[in-house]
Image: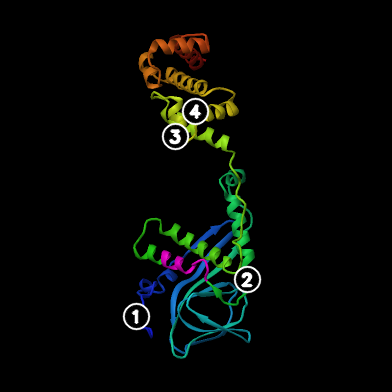
Amino acid sequence: MRPSSSGYKPFPFELMLEQPHALDKLDIRFRWGNYGVNVLKFHLTTFAPGKVVDYHKHSEYELHYIPRGKGTLLLEGSVHPLSAGMMYVTGPNVLHRQEADPNEAMDELCLHVDLVRLSGKSGDTEREDEWGDALECAEAELCVGMLSQFTAVPATDRHDAMQMFLTAYRAWYEGMPGLYTVLKQSVIQILLRTISAQTKLSPKVDLPSRDMYRHRYQLAVQFIHDNYMMPLMVEHVAERVQISVRQLQRVFRSQTGDTFGDYLERYRLTQICRQLERSGSSIQRIAADCGFSSANYLHHVFKKSFGITPQEYRERHRSSGTSAESG
């Protein structure tokens, strides 16, 4: 802990001083969109007063953040002052020199990453796109593209990328469940928040808009599938979907051409048929299990829909099954 001229001030990254290079020891590698991300350095380091790191460059991206102290950055002859709250990026082959103030130490958070473009995609492309993989690819592409155009001149860490270092460290320090996921998300957040520091508006990838009729229909249908065996009124489902009964009926008509009641009855009958085919339970038991108030009511609805009784359906299915086995 270092005192300041106005007395001691808590250092937000105090915890990281215990093992400042702990995250460097983890082999953090993951895929982000069409890029492989290999984390080479992920640490807090301290430059003693007057400490100089002479001119050097890297073939990867190195992201620097100053949480405390002050110093100077030299970029191929240009001098730039550094102070708490600032950040800068030295991309591939950017020659730079760092030094701390002669009278004051300077802390630096550093993320050094190798971003490798991967060729092709594995798996079911259509399925991946459906689940958002195309959006992730677009975000990663945009971020890497902006990093490649990033000016190395120091700027203010306007989006608090530094905080993600502490988030990652604390997850490791506390043995948090899902550590790998937290580390991955922290690195991605640092990259995204960094590129936002030099843009007036955050880079935007348009997300697809939902067809709300379709979305509400899917929510309602899933609720019916989960609860069809219980007394289920249209009011119950409308409340769960958070729309009015009239709106819910409109949703079902737009998606199926039927009313809510028609859909519920049809779904219950499909479950009845399955149980008649596979189960030896009584008709009364099956009716109760599938949300019908009585076996008599089921008999009425079933015969109206299929032209035969539940018992006749069961006998026909067993007869066809026996014939198939004997054939």
Q: Amino acid at mark 4?
A: Val
Counting from the top left corner in percent of width and height, residue 183 is at 45, 62
Viewport quadrant of the N terminus:
bottom left
**SS category of the residue bearing label 1:** loop
Q: Residues within 10 Å of mark 3 (few under 14, many from 20)?
A: few
- Which label lies toward us, 2 or 4? 4
How far apart are the two marked residues, 1 and 4, measured between alpha carbons?
62 Å
Mark closest to the chain's N terminus, 1 or 2: 1
Q: Which residue is labeled 3 in the image?
A: 240
Q: Using the image as rendered, state which of residue 318 and residue 182 is in the foreground.
A: 182
Q: Give, as a three-letter code, the residue at label 2.
A: Phe
Q: Nearer the viewer, mark 3 or mark 4?
A: 4
In three-dimensional space, the C-alpha distance between marks 3 and 4, rounded to whole angstroms, equals 11 Å
Which colour style is shown? rainbow
Above or below: residue 244 compared with residue 98: above
Within the magenta stretch, is there residue 184? no
Q: Which residue is mark 1?
A: 8
What residue type is disc 1 on?
Tyr
As measured in the structure, the alpha-carbon distance from the residue carrying label 1 to the one carrying label 2 is 36 Å
The residue that label 2 is drawn on is: 150
User: Circle 3 — which element?
Assistant: helix
Nearest to the observer: residue 303 or residue 128: 303
Dot 3 or dot 4, earlier in sequence = 3
Specify the quadrant of the image occupied by residue 194.
bottom right
Between discs 3 and 2, the one toward the N terminus? 2
Residue 249, percent from left and from top: 53, 26
Q: Identify which amino acid the numbered label 3 is placed on.
A: Arg
Which mark lies nearer to you, 3 or 2? 3
Part of the protein shown in magenta? 157-168
Q: Which mark is residue 245?
A: 4
**Membership of 159 in magenta stretch:** yes
